[in-house]
Amino acid sequence: MMTLEQYLLTKLAEEAAEISQIALKTAQFGVHERYKPSGLTNIERVEQEYNDLIAIVSMLKEECNIVIKTDEDKIKSKKSKVFHYLNYSRNLCLTEF
């Protein structure tokens, strides 16, 4: 039998996978494309999955006393890395042709 902590960590992974899936679909079909069964745009679906993920993080913090902090310095560092590798990728594409 799973503990609550194990269950919520499994749900966290599940929500992360769902965000991954809708992010890929949004990249492919665009933010304004509507998913017919729900009528939501892709960006609305991203928002929905993001909020589901935050809900699970909140439950881990509240129910299992797990400390998960938002660290602005780490966020800033990640943003910098993302742009670094974006530029690197763009430069590779330019040199391949």
Image: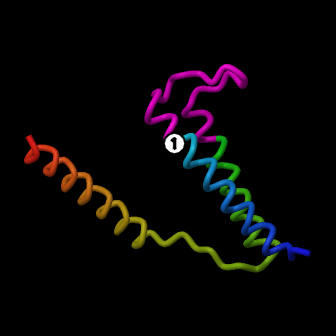
Q: Is residue 61 left or right of residue 42?
A: right
Q: Is residue 65 left or right of residue 93?
A: right
Q: Is residue 41 magenta?
A: yes
Is residue 45 in the magenta section? yes
Rendered position, 57 above or below 49: below
Q: Tag 1: Cα neighbours inside 10 Å, few (<14), some, or many (≥20)? A: some
What amino acid does circle 1 point to?
A: Ala
Q: Quadrant of residue 67?
A: bottom right
Looking at the rendering, in which quadrant would you find the N terminus?
bottom right
**Residue closer to the observer: 29 or 72:** 29
Residue at 61% across / 56% down in the picture? Answer: 16
| Magenta stretch bounds | 23-47
Q: Which residue ends up furthest to the right in the rendered image? A: 1
Q: 11 or 46, which is in the foreground? A: 11
Q: Is residue 52 above or below residue 75?
A: above
The residue tagged 1 is: 23
- Is residue 91 left or right of 32 when viewed as pictured? left
Q: Could you say whether the residue bearing mark 1 is in a helix, strand or loop?
A: helix
| Occupied quadrant, residue 35 | top right
Between 28 and 33, the residue placed more toward the observer is 28
